[in-house]
Amino acid sequence: MSSPASASSCGEGVNPSPPAAGAVGAAASAGAAAPWPRRHCRDVFWLVVFLLHLLVFGAALALFGLNRFLQADRFNMGRFANQTALPWGTVAGAPEPAPAPPPPSVYRAEDPSAPASELTETYWKYYGAAGAVGAALAWAWLATAAARKDGGKVLMRTAVHSLTAYLAVVSVLCFWGKHVFWGAALGVGAGLHFLYVMSVLDSYLLIFARLPFTMLVLQKAVKMVWELPDVMRVAYAFVLVMLCWMALWSFGVSGIVAFGMPNGGQWWLLLIFSVSLFWTGAVLSNTVHVIVSGMVFLVLIHGGPAAASMPPKPLLKSLQYAITTSFGSICYGSLFTAAIRTLRWEIRGIRSKIGSNECLLCCIDFVFHIVETLVRFFNKYAYVQIAVNGRSFNRSARDAWELFQSTGIEALVAYDCSGAVLLMSIILGGLITGTCTGVWVYFKQSDKAVMVGSTSMLMGMILVGLTVVVVESAVTSIYICYAKDPLLIQRWDPEFFEQISEALHQRLQYRSSRARQVLNGRLDHLPHTSSI
């Protein structure tokens, strides 16, 4: 039977229950000699789907980009607009009617009134600027988190207090530019964000303030990142990889924007390719998540990055596992995790603000329970289990959920809003990128400002997200390690161990008192029957 250290060092069979007090020391002493265990590829189907998606979409992007690069409609794609079907009611063998004159083409490639300058390179420079702004914001975010002792506090306050105002300002600008849909969408986003922040500020204020606790967790996660400078280099390397893919993506999208398709064809194509970019960015981001989680888990279980029991080349081994055997699981989870997490946060904020409207509360509770069920199968803590155990995504998500439920840590995880704060940083970075690019395009070609600005916003969000995930991985790994064995956190930071234990104790007490109040309220509404 393998030792706990070999299982913990990114191996198979980590015991989900907390080990005994002396198990950590034994694991650390045995870890140096324990070989890296062999793993098997998981979720291979989704790995194949993702790779095929890259090939197909990469070829399509190259085709659309080259179609209008240096020459209008190089591949004569505009001819597909002139194809007409047989008129309805035409009888076979009957004399054919005189052919009608061909309709004028609406494609810019054949429209003499369209400016000849609308080629791929016309818009490619805007997307190049968006990539530069997004990469600069990503670098600035990680540098701020790492260079300042209170970097987590600065980033948190900036994200929480700036996002609502920024959304509202951009919404007003969209209405001013007569883009009603985008103005309304951003206005609704500003309202939902304000509602969430208010729910965070109001909830459980007398028990344990959520924002100070979130700030504490973020600061400790940043401290962990300080101790592992190599993970920052991994984040920067993946930003460069993402920029390379974005060069091809923006090349193809620039050709689509310059093509000028009718009937909203541009928007549909941009939506499809934006989903592809989002999935690719999420896969790269979660790959960093798995790498960092494996490193953090090793540091905590061995007592530090310089411990003698640390296995050789842990970063390279975590990278190898992430991009080979566990890559299929990362591709699978990246499709759904982000959307479900965002929906869960918003529903929690709305649910806490409904009040006494029982009908609306019943509907929200129904949706909330559906989302909570989905969280059991798609949660960000699964990536830590993937890094540690190398299991499939669904198995890892269930293991993490059951671990939190059995130890009571789920009450603390639900109370922490560090994930929402980090998401605010990502959205803010995307909005700044999209606004900078959109304003530039507006003064050049105002009719394409929203189209280029919205896709540039997605580029900025992905680039910032690749650096934010470093801190998020540290947060999730801290919770998983605390659930597996609290002594790991106590040995790393005794003061933080006391603070997080006190917070957990207060949360469990609060939930118990709330459960008693609900039960007593339901008993009071039951009809009283007299004994005979």
Image (cartoon, rainbow, N blue to C red):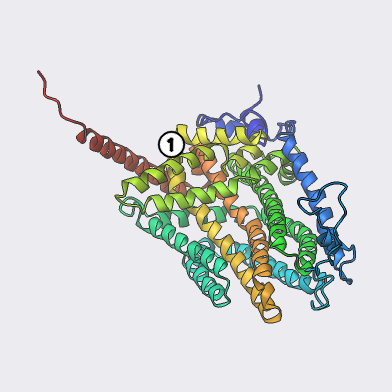
Which of 334/56 is in front? 56
Can residue 302 be seen from the camera position used here?
no
Left or right of 105? Residue 46 is left
**Image coords of residue 416 (percent x, y):** 46, 50
Q: Amino acid at mark 1?
A: Gly
Image height of 103 relative to 404, above or below: below
Image height of 37 relative to 177, above or below: above
The residue sitting at the front extreme is 94
Can you say which quadrant of the picture contains the N terminus?
top right
Q: Which residue is mark 1?
A: 408
Task: Answer with the quarter of the image where residue 396 lies.
Answer: top right
**Image coords of residue 13 (percent x, y):** 63, 28
Q: Across the whole image, how many numbered discs are drawn on residues?
A: 1
Image height of 318 relative to 206, above or below: above
**Residue in view at x 65 percent, y 34 percent:** 389
Binning the other alpha carbons within 10 Å of mark 1 as few (below 14), some (14 to 19) or many (20 upward) gives some
